[in-house]
Image: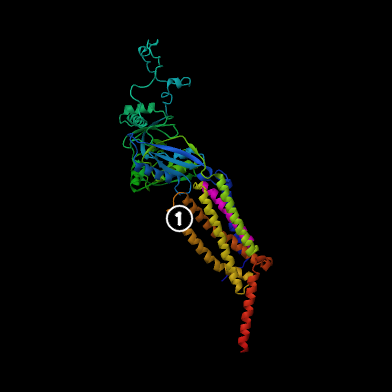
Amino acid sequence: MPPSQGSAHPLRLLGVYAALLAVIYALVFFTGDKDPTPKLGIDLQGGTRVTLTARTPDGSSPSQDSLKKAQEIIENRVNGLGVSGSEVAIEGENIVITVPGDDGQQARALATTAKLYIRPVLQASPPIAGAQQTPPAQQTTPGATTPAPEPAPAPAEQPSEPQQRVFPAQAPTDEPAEPSLTPQEQTQREIAEARASRQSTDQATQLAAMAALDCTKPDPLAGNDDPNLPLVTCSQDGTEVFLLDKSRIDGQEIANATSNLDTQQSRWVVDLEFKSTGSDAWADLTGEYVQRRVAFTLDSQVVSAPQVQQGPQLGGTTQISGSFSASSARELANTLKYGSLPLSFQTSEAETVSATLGLSSLRAGLIAGAVGLAITLLYCLVYYRMLGFLTGLSLLLSGLGVYGLMVLLGRWIGFTLDLAGIAGLIIGIGMTADSFVVFFERIKDEMREGRSFRSAVPRGWQRARRTILTGNAVSFLAAAVLYVLAVGQVKGFAFTLGLTTILDVVVVFLVTWPLVLLASRREFWARPSMNGLGAIQEVARERRAAQGSVSESVRTR
């Protein structure tokens, strides 16, 4: 049976699509950064490159297995869905990260080791050593408390008069007597010194470390602290110095991490879900430390140190709160979800990378797509007359939906549009035009059987929609397989192809079919000169005349 002929049916479908477009563009213009342009990939707008140099505790060279594991984890962090357009490559003993745009901080943040431990808090106090660790010559704050200055070198070591010698006198230097250390040896020495003072089991040494710790300086222990020893460290915002007990739960016990907005306190938090062993350890810890604080440390810094209100806490879930924004909470959740790096890294300054293809290639690709679209519309107008106009209107509404989704996906999942993605969009729009052709040809088939344009439209739709759904299902399956198996830019091509395939079905069902149904009820559109179906109607009349003559000859016999 053909669908209902009620006048509200097509208008209701068009209203649904109009509401979808309204929601999409409301999100585009009134949420996030409100920038109505999609993010572009490295090949179109350039990017930022950061080189990561591995730091091992013993100063030795990192193994290739560790580097490959770190590369895989960083790729998952930045490109979990494979559509952000970022690149992570191993160059010798370094890892090079390239991200679209000019945000070097984003690339550096990917290098966090992300070793998470949950440690009981033994003692906490405000930092008091910021001025003590600054050399006297650099202190400018009046009244600052400073340690006693080191005794000056003996005068005999720096004679006031130059010695009588045949070569010119040289200025005194501060170089140590020992040979200069290599960067690896210097790193090893800094880590060892920090561990000796800040991870000592002696209480006096711990208190001295708390008094001397400067939270404004880089931490050599970042990602290199021993979880089986106590730790003196700072909070992430530098407002507290903590003495922590040995780790009770390792970050490897986290099964999942998600960022969410705590509506009651209007702040972003990270919700953690533990594995079975981690769930048991959390229950034991919260049962033991009721009304006391436990600290979540990330790369040797305290991210959050809440007080346990009640315990033991069962269920294997907990929450990290802090001074998070939406993006920082999401980054921390992704970092914890995909695991910690097997190495700690020192990052270089960000370098600007020029676009490999540039805006000229983008312009050429868009022009090629526009030319192809214009030729398609011209063919539809010539072959289907005013029905081709409906095709153009449907493609325009489809393009509006695709553009809005590209902008939103760039904000939500970091999707970037590169040249391969543009190719996927153009192919997807072409497939949408194919669906229109299938529909119109089914209408012709119905009219060849002698039906009018008005009655042929709903019957043709019933036959065409099965073909349209089948064809799009095959295309979507191919795009899904390509997305799973491909890497790099091919993944972005498959993603956009699958997205436009889904939108093709939405547009055909919510826009094209209702428009053609409304047109079939208007006398203007039923004219052969308008719908281009005059030849088909003539064929139908000839068939009816032939059948009538055959029937007449049979009766005369």
Residue 3 lies in quadrant: bottom right
Apparent side of residue 142 relative to residue 61 in the rendered image (left or right): right
Residue 276 in picture, x, y percent from top left: 34, 48
Identify residue type, mark 1.
Leu
Residue 129 lies in quadrant: top left
Give the answer, above or below, for where 194 lies relative to 46: above
Apparent side of residue 220 relative to residue 477 in the rendered image (left or right): left
Residue 479 in picture, x, y percent from top left: 47, 56
Q: Residue 159 or 390: which is nearer the viewer? A: 159
Main secondary-structure element of the magenta-colored stretch: helix
Residue 122 in picture, x, y percent from top left: 35, 33
**Quadrant placement of the N terminus:** bottom right
Give the answer, above or below, for where 17 lies relative to 35: below
Apparent side of residue 292 relative to residue 385 in the rendered image (left or right): left
Magenta span: 387-410
**Quadrant placement of the C terminus:** bottom right
Name, please, the residue furthest toward the bottom.
Answer: 557
**In magenta segment, residue 403:** yes
**In magenta segment, residue 100:** no
Q: Residue 343 or 172: which is nearer the viewer? A: 172
The secondary element bearing badge 1 is classed as: helix
What's the residue at 64%, 60% (across, down)?
Answer: 389
